[in-house]
Amino acid sequence: MIVTEFNPRHDRCSLLIESAEDLWTLRRLISKGDVVVTRSSRVVKKEDEYSRPDKGERVKVNIALVVEEINLDSSVERLRVKGKIIEASDESVSKAGFHAITLSPGHPLSIRKTHWTSVEIGLVNAERGSSKRFILVAVDRREAGVGALSGSHLSVATTVESGLGGKQSEEQSSKPYVSKVVDVLAGMFREGDEIVVAGPGNFKNAVINQAKERLKSVSVQAMEGLDLTGADGLHAMVKEPAFQKIAQGSLLVEMEKLVAEFVRRVSTGDKKVAYSLVRVKEAAEAGAVESCAISDDVFSAGLDEEELVAVLNSIEGRRGAVYMADSSLEFGRQISSFGGIVALLRYPIRAS
């Protein structure tokens, strides 16, 4: 999430959604009664003599809503906000009506609150100081998977096919393919990103060399020991010890450590753990949660969305840490197997 403006004294925050993980943060930031301002579209019916009553023109409009409902659908990476219109840039849009907007990665918006809580301020500031983003490439002579790891969420941007034959090895023949891969990198890259290129053999060096040449002073490094490419290669890449070393100190590595410690405590009978919403909620109310991780498919377990958000905010309000896990990664699947939410505790509680 890119925070472009944040002034809690003037009750305003402007931002750009970058990933599905950001939607979780917004679900915790936006509450009933807040005002959300963003770009949307709305059907405006014409009232002239010859217009059809069932037809209208869809217009783009800047709109401000007083939030009445908010729902997260992380499986399709969207957040739906419904509310009463209080401002609109097009005079044909009725201020007395209601409207629903669908927020997804790439969407800019502003949030206005009458009061920002310490937890909400902490969420925004955490996004401002979030760990670096890694652009990942898993490549060989036939295909390249390109994706981005932001926090603990891995998104696959595209797969580039080379069209080269299996035994064709002339350097000239691979240049258009390499250029195409680097074009994707150039389109994704932003200041502060780190590019990591992996894949079997030495072909990855051609991508690294051209990326360094075109993107200049950008950090681009090779990762050895990966035989897979494409989208499968990207998912395998983040599990490799070589990448863990490169990403030392990142949110991904912290998540790996948290889940490994949780599994260790469960397997050894250590009572300083909790899992399932009921038990984590009890631990949160007791102030016992040191850190908590939820899987982005947590709602598939039938959990109540409002209750879950309240529990997460309660944990951070008592100085616990909350992490979001990508369910497509191994540690995310482990969390899903425990009901979608796990916690490390400062001390045992009765329910654990």
Image (tube, grey):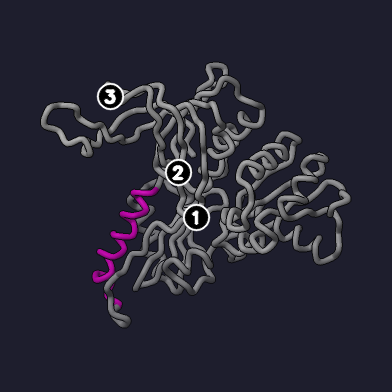
- Examine the structure image and report whether residue 97 is included in the region drawn in magenta: no
User: Is residue 140 among what the camera can see?
Assistant: yes
Which comes before the other along the chain, label 3 or label 1?
1
Q: Which residue does the image show at 44% across and 36% down from the upper left?
A: 16
Q: Seen in the image, is 83 located left or right of residue 250? A: left
Write down the residue under mark 3.
90
Disc 2 target residue: 18
Q: Nearer the viewer, mark 2 or mark 1?
A: 1
Q: Amino acid at mark 3?
A: Asp
Q: Earlier in the sequence, mark 2 or mark 1?
A: 2
Amino acid type of the residue that numbered disc 1 sits on in the rendered structure: Ser
**Marker count (numbered):** 3
Identified at 71% across, 51% down, the residue is 277
Q: Please give the name of the residue rendered at 67% of the width and 51% of the height, measured from the top-left corner.
A: 293
Where residue 146 appears, as percent x and y from the top left, is: 41, 59
Q: Amino acid at mark 2?
A: Glu
Label 1: element kind: helix
Q: Assess disc 1: are there few (<14), some (14-19) or many (≥20) residues with their C-alpha within 10 Å of its C-alpha.
A: few
Question: Residue at point 70% right, 61% down?
Answer: 338
Tell me residue 123's x, y (percent): 60, 35
In the rendered image, the quadrant that contains the C terminus is bottom right
Residue 116 percent coordinates (x, y): 60, 24
Distance, label 2 to label 1, CA atoms, is: 16 Å
Viewer-closest of 75 and 253: 75
Q: Earlier in the sequence, mark 3 or mark 2?
A: 2
The residue range painted magenta reads: 169-188
Crowd around label 3: few <14 · some 14–19 · many ≥20 (10 Å): some
Q: Is residue 247 visible?
A: no
The answer to which of 20 and 82 lies nearer the viewer is 82
